[in-house]
Amino acid sequence: MTKTLMQSAWAAAAVLAAIPVLAADGADLERGRYLATAGDCVACHTAPGGKPMAGGLALASPLGAIYSTNITPSKVYGIGSYSLQQFSDALRHGRRADGANLYPAMPYTAYAKTSDEDIAALYAYFMQGVQPVDKAPAQQTDLPFPFNIRASLSLWNAVFLDARPYRADASQSPEWNRGAYLAQGLAHCSTCHTPRNALMAEDGKRFLGGSEVGGWYAPNISSDAKSGIAGWTREELVRYLSGQPVPGKGSAAGPMVEAIDHSLKHLSPEDLQAIALYIKSVHAVAEAKATQPADSFGRAWDDLDSLRGAALPKSHNAMTGAQLYDGHCASCHQAQGQGSDGDGLPALFHNTTLGHASSNNLVQVMLHGIQRVGTDSVMPGFADELSDVQITTLGNYLLSNYGNPEAKVSEQQVAQLRDTAEVGVDKSLLALARVGLALGALVVLGILAWLLRRRKA
């Protein structure tokens, strides 16, 4: 695998022409499978109850749902007719075989870092190791104007896409370069964890500095002492990426637990060590709201005295935080929020989910639970049992007593995160784009009118 890094500067045309991908042996297919796992392809391209890689999953975006495509080797509905060059163009340039642009919900801005050799292995796997599904996804992406004009992405790509493969840093060790290659490329860490600018491109100055993704907060994983993960050891990071609980830190949820279950926990121990080494070295990005590390808040505490002899109110919306906690949380997280031994059921204090300034992840977990793949899901969601008022009351009780007391939960926030169809939609961005388009049209019309007047004069 080190050879991949050393040869990443090969010319693309020469490599694509030289590798006989259609004659791939078992080792080539296994390597391609491993790389596809590192890229977490199956998570986005498999709908609930659908066939693997057949597409149809709705991906939340600020502009509405973007539906993943069929990437099986079906020649009718998938990518079975793609040449190696066309496959490479999709991964590196976000361009389909018909020349249309892909939306950057497909993280081609990160996949572009993949070496030519690894792209060839991926191509062999998708063409020979994936079962073709001759069925189109049930729904097609239909974003509002002007984002339904895919040609406009050519300008976005010209400004924001760096399609060059990863280039090894000679000042760093092979292990560090391996971690950087995976984290920057197929694992696409920055796609979720890097804030975006007004044009939805990653802000490189705040690399891995935390961002919101589909109503979830992807936390700051830079090396900042208060805002990031400077307090995490390398072994704790490896344990976390392996899908194991990390006492005193908390557990993964939402899109991160999907990435772990589908991808990261299946990587080799050596690759996980390399990723952790690289992530620990990323420059610090400070957040003004972070006054102390997210895993440092709270203590073991209970409010049992307020429950003794107190009758439940007639209206469930009038229940106190202590009553809600006792009825819905204490059986697993224990009376004082201490969880179980080894954090199989995590403690609520010293838990990053409750320690960030953003309370979105806490609300999401209370509403929708933690859904695991290939292992038991032990955190149920309470969206069908608790009202917006109750979730708000319980959330603020948890934050005040076990987490960051400066973080708050609001009823409006709960209502928005409950409605999964609207999660992450930014109507202001759509309005801004339309205003910008209108202003651009007015400028063009103004220039044309000025030219006509000059011509008449």
Image (tube, grey):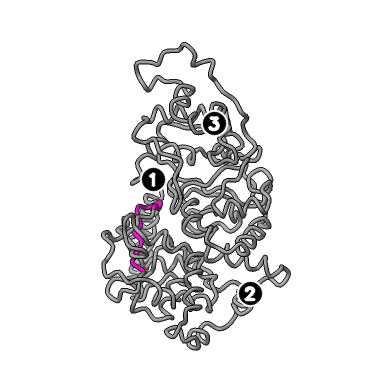
* Bounds of the magenta segment: 60-71
- Give the image location of residue 9, x and y in percent: 60, 79
Mark 2, other Cα within 10 Å: few <14 / some 14–19 / many ≥20: few
- Residue furthest to the right: 171
In front here: 178 or 342?
Answer: 342
- Residue on which the image places disc 3: 399
In front here: 382 or 270?
Answer: 270
Name the image quarter holding residue 268: bottom right
Marks 3/1 in contact by CB < 8 Å: the verdict is no
Residue, x 33% and y 69% (percent of image)?
A: 452
Residue, x 50% and y 37% (percent of image)?
A: 359
Q: How far apart are labels 3 and 1 at the CA level? A: 22 Å
In front here: 309 or 122?
Answer: 309
Q: How far apart are labels 2 and 3 at the CA level? A: 45 Å
Give the prevailing secondary structure in the magenta stretch. loop
Name the image quarter holding residue 94: bottom left
N-term mark: 2 or 3: 2
N-term mark: 2 or 1: 2
In which quadrant of the rendered image does the N terminus lie? bottom right
In the depicted structure, whether residue 9 falls above or below residue 415? below
Amino acid residing under circle 2: Thr
Marks 2/1 in contact by CB < 8 Å: the verdict is no
Q: How far apart are labels 2 and 1 at the CA level? A: 41 Å
- Residue on which the image places disc 1: 423
Residue, x 57% and y 27% (percent of image)?
A: 336
Left or right of 45 in this view: 33: right
In the depicted structure, whether residue 217 falls above or below residue 172? above
- Residue on which the image places disc 2: 2
Secondary structure at numbered mark 3: helix
Residue 241 visible from this viewpoint: yes
Secondary structure at numbered mark 2: helix
